[in-house]
Image (cartoon, grey):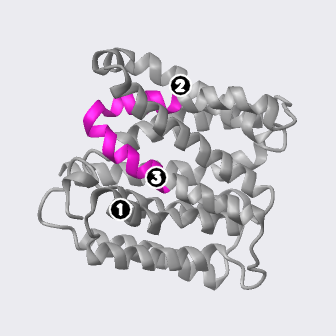
Amino acid sequence: MKQRRAELAMVAVTIVWGSTFVLIKEALADISTILFLALRFSLAAIVLWFIYQKAVRTRSAGWKTLGPGALTGVLLFSAYAFQTAGLKLTTPSKSAFITGLSIPMVPLASSLVYRVKPRLMEVVGILIASFGMGLMTLPAAGLGINLGDVLSLLCAVTFALHLVVVSHYTPIIGFESVSVLQVVVAAGLGLMVFPVAERAVFHPNMAVVAAVAVTGLFATAFAFTTMTWAQQYTTATRTALICALEPVVAWLMSWWLTGETMPVRGQLGAGLILGGIVLVELKRPVSSETGGEAATSM
């Protein structure tokens, strides 16, 4: 039951993430990307510290806590930085697909770290979902590789490592510590980097305020806390597979808010993503999968 609740919570997180694409796209016309990330993570850090400071102080044990927190924070910020930089140099659809390659990378990374083999149905589900994501996001032509694609690939690798690292450290230092420290570190990096990494643009308006508030409170503070808690009771592989729902939710929200349509090819891809997730969920293992990837044979 804990695993079921954890995975349902991850579905909710994915819905939140997928729902913010339209809001963020509108806001980025009036604020530079790294500055936006810095404000988003700073707001989330303040909220999470206010809520969990007692738990963090209780579980704090020097570098045994700060080290994992710093590592997850660096990975989190790096993934978003690679993603935003790549978006400037490649198409949104190619960026979405290449970033989504973190899904098949997670079981590979977990296998290397924990020396365990993924379950057959998880591998099949991931392959089906990855193919579906390709149908949804990749254009039929123009698949040449450029620097933006390489940066997007680095984003995918970093996201995959982030999922595995969070799964490993959460049972050890507590989800509160991981949640707070990774966001605090990401906020600090954003505030330090944006003055030198880009020409800062900031034209405050309702779109910018709404985007910072929604992404800071819901897509960061709520989402990463929930994800970190959930990864105590499920695996990094299954978490990554659930995250494949994000482009489906993003398209549905765009269709609802802007009237964007999707060709039959994209609809088939969305169906394959859902099918891959359902396949894995229906073939749920009998034994409990708690404590992250290290506690299971996958």
Tell me the number on the disc at residue 112.
1
Q: CB of mark 1 within 8 Å of CB of mark 2?
A: no
Q: Residue at x 83, y 38 (%)?
A: 198
Disc 3, SS = helix
Tell me the number on the disc at residue 102.
none
Q: Is residue 238 visible?
A: no
- Three-letter amino acid code at disc 3? Leu
Count of labels in the image: 3
Q: Nearer the viewer, mark 3 or mark 2?
A: 3
Which one is nearer the viewer's eye here, 85 or 9? Answer: 85
Q: CA distance from mark 1 to mark 2?
A: 32 Å
Q: Residue at x 55, y 64 (%)?
A: 100
Q: Is residue 3 visible?
A: yes
- Three-letter amino acid code at disc 1? Leu
- Is 187 situated above or below 94? above
Q: Residue at x 59, y 40 (%)?
A: 77
Q: Position of residue 234 (x, y in %)?
A: 27, 53
Disc 1, SS = helix
| Image-based side of 13 in relation to 35, left or right | left
| Image-based side of 212 in relation to 170, left or right | right
Q: CA distance from mark 3 to mark 1?
A: 11 Å
Q: Which residue is mark 3?
A: 161
Residue 173 within the magenta-colored segment of the rendering: yes
Q: Position of residue 86 (x, y in %)?
A: 73, 56
Q: CB of mark 3 within 8 Å of CB of mark 2?
A: no
Disc 2, SS = helix
Q: Which residues are magenta?
A: 160-183
Q: Residue at x 69, y 26 (%)?
A: 191
Q: CA distance from mark 3 to mark 2?
A: 22 Å
Q: Which residue is mark 2?
A: 45
Disc nearer the start of the sequence (3/2): 2
